[in-house]
Amino acid sequence: MKAVVLERRGADGVRIGDFPDPARPPGNAVIRVRAAALNHADLYMRDDGRGITHELPMVLGLDAAGEVVEADPDSGLTPGQRVMSYPMEFCGTCPQCQAGEQPWCENLRIIGEQRHGTYGEYLSAKAGCFLPVPDTLDWHQAAALPAAYMTAWRMMFGKAPLLPHETVLIHGVGGGVALACLQMAAMVGARAIVTSGSADKLARAEELGAVAGIDYRDNTVWKAVMDLTQGRGVDMVIDNVGAATWGDSLRAAAWGGRIVTCGTTSGAQPPADLQRVFVRQLRIFGSTAANLAEYRALLRTVAEGRLLPVIDSVHPMDGALEALARMAKAEQFGKIVLDIP
């Protein structure tokens, strides 16, 4: 098959070309991939990969949508069925899986990190990793939905759910998770304040429902938040940036507020400022992808027409290097998608 393959670290270590077709062991299904979406995890794997057990060369990619080619008769999948990926291969038998928390699986393997990913013509994974595509979505939208939107769903509703009367601060509103959080805040009627270094992205975010946008190039974010909230602060902060935004996150949170973090694109070791945490009785939640029950709730919401992924751009598979470069420069507004011919 044709695939986007990481052979060594660095932008020049990615090639597009032939790669062996994936095998289908018992319990797996194989899909013909029609579209695959980019995530920041792809850049981490390309440029670093420390802390993730894997071998090179490997096919990149976490998200995919396509058609079932082959599956076991008792899998619930049928050839030709439109499906989308759940990016984490889980065993289904460990105590965490039995409790319905697949992201905590004791034998977890993340697609595109611990094993081959989605940027190829074919993908083989455990049958439970494929869910039906809502009829409202085309291939590109379906590929854009899994990792970013399920991560956002768990951040917004899985820990300490955002309520309609509350205000949320969302850092870096160009990326997929941040935009998904904005859409979900607007969906439940909450107030969303967003940040970006791009005036165009801030304007587009307001079109999607943000009540205010803060350009971090010209403002101290936490002070601007206090001005916008009459000195109270926000009930929730969505932070997937890390070291560069953590101080603002702590200072912008209201007394008793919560901070939900799912990423560290700017670094993972910010000052803790523990005195502020305990004096203001802040709650800090770590979050990754949704469990299957949360993922299905997200898909029901999409099927009802209440949520639609924002697509930044669609690139052919042969343009994968340019697509990765666009994400590395933070030029996107929404999800970048590869079309798999």
Image: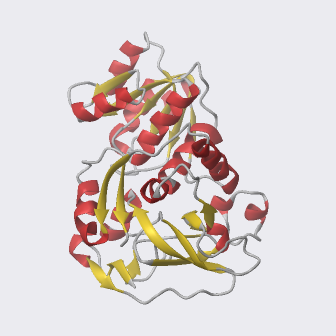
Q: How is the image coloured?
A: secondary structure
Q: Quadrant of the C terminus?
A: bottom left
State which quadrant residue 281 falls in.
Answer: top right
Q: Quadrant of the N terminus?
A: bottom left
Rendered residue at 61%/26% (across/down):
163
Rendered residue at 36%/79% (across/down):
3
State which quadrant residue 30 falls in.
Answer: bottom right
Instruction: Look at the image and tell me whether residue 294 can be seen.
Output: yes
In percent of width and height, residue 270 lies at: 39, 44
Residue 289 against residue 120 in the figure, above or below: above
Of residues 273 and 195, the one nearer the viewer is 195
Q: Is residue 129 left or right of residue 327?
A: right
Residue 241 against residue 198 in the figure, above or below: below
Of residues 136 and 279, the one nearer the viewer is 136
Q: In this view, does 169 lie to the left or right of 132?
A: left
Of residues 188 and 168, the one nearer the viewer is 188
Instruction: Look at the image and tell me whether residue 272 can be seen.
Output: no
Residue 169 against residue 28 in the figure, above or below: above
How many labels, in total?
0
Rendered residue at 73%/69% (across/down):
92
Rendered residue at 35%/31% (across/down):
205
Residue 94 against residue 177 in the figure, above or below: below
In percent of width and height, residue 225 lies at: 38, 20
Q: In this view, does 71 lie to the left or right of 122?
A: right
In percent of width and height, residue 85 lies at: 55, 64
In percent of width and height, residue 108 lies at: 61, 69
